[in-house]
Image (cartoon, helix red, strand yellow):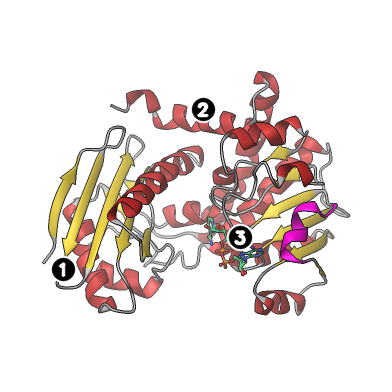
Amino acid sequence: MNTYTELDMPGYQEVVRCDNPEVGFTAWIAVHNSHRGPALGGCRVWCYDSDEAALTDVLRLSRGMTYKNALARLPLGGGKSVVRTDLLRVDRVALFEELGNFVEHLGGRYITAEDVNSTLSDMVAVKRRTSHVATVGASGNPSPFTAYGVYCAIRASVRHKLQREGLDGLTVAIQGVGETGGRLAELLKKDHCRIIASDINPAHIEALGKKIDLELVRPEEIYTVACDIFAPCALGGILNSRTIPGLLCQIVAGSANNQLQTEEDGDLLSRRGILYAPDYAANAGGVINISCEIDQPYDEKLAMRRTAAIEQTLLEIYRLADEQKRPTNLVANTMAEELFGASLVC
Ligand code: NAD
């Protein structure tokens, strides 16, 4: 049986802990801010070393969702759930059904979805206990929408930085050609871009190589390859004081979450004259797609149109960044805070 404990976390609207020793997990749901609507964010399952590590993660991730959902102008707040367990040792169906009960306990203030180590079939189990779960309807895999949104972010960045409309002839270096990076490469190739790629998984390189022409570099070389656009589509924290000085690009725009190791790294990029597309603005296509099945029949065309609006959001961030002479990551943060009413947070 689940037991629930309310936690008092300054700056967060609601944080609840759930213990279930019979099934073998502890989970946390954090609702960071719901001024724009119910808090949407995925459910991450991880073998955390400690409860503190899990709690830190849910706080960080839910806050990030508030910013992402607000900047995409979705009628949704930011939330997240994390589960501390060992998936190899638990009854997976029982785990996700109990998680469904946990989500239901919040009465619709939090809506869940897949994330790292939780899948669509896990969400089907969640849905047996609560209706507050997205993605079990028709929206499906978010990655094509995320990739398309990043493509739109690249178009905006090229228009702003290089003062040109099309992408043909530009060189894009992509770090990670998995679900999002691979699809991004295909979209860019249709626009006659030259693709340079790196990945630590040879199967992903091979799969993409069967579809498009690409040049390969070793994982460490991707940071110093000469290109117009560097697209991080694998890991967080890769833009830092070690990598930024070596970058030979004019634009950074990719799907990876938390690309900047610290907010100051945005300033470092800006001082090097490199235009940075803030990650949570560029990679919002997946969540925009999911939002199109909440409280409405899913409409793929609408999801594509809303994802395409990422281009306008980026252009607005760039215009303000020029006007205010501030790095784009900080401008995006301020825009998001205005949109979710940060000043209202107690
Ligand atoms: P994925 O696992 O399908 O692809 C990531 C790829 O990066 C894999 O091919 C992996 O082998 C490769 N990789 C890992 N470490 C690498 C390294 N050091 N150098 C080069 N390649 C490396 O994941 P994805 O769904 O494409 O997500 C990529 C990033 O985008 C993640 O940060 C994710 O959180 C973020 N993101 C994804 C979505 C989505 O809809 N999938 C939405 C928003 C954000």
Residue 21's mark?
Answer: 1
Q: Between tags 2 and 1, which lies in front?
A: 1
Q: Please name the predominant secondary structure of the magenta segment in the image.
A: helix
Residue ID at (77%, 34%): 272
Q: Could you tell whether 204 is left or right of 172 in the image?
A: left
Q: Quadrant of the N terminus?
A: bottom left
What residue does disc 2 label? 334
Q: Could you tell whether 184 is left or right of 285 in the image?
A: right
Residue 56, image x and y in percent? 36, 47
Q: Is residue 220 magenta?
A: yes
What residue does disc 3 label? 234
Classify mark 1: helix, strand or loop: loop
Residue 125, image x and y in percent? 27, 73
Ligand 1: does it lie within 8 Å of the C-beta at label 3?
yes
Q: Could you tell whether 267 is left or right of 342 in the image?
A: right
- Direction top: furthest residue: 324
Label 2 close to label 1 by CB (< 8 Å): no
Q: Which residues are magenta?
A: 218-226
- Direction right: furthest residue: 169
Residue ID at (63%, 37%): 265
Classify mark 3: helix, strand or loop: loop
As shown in the figure, which amino acid type bears the numbered disc 1? Pro
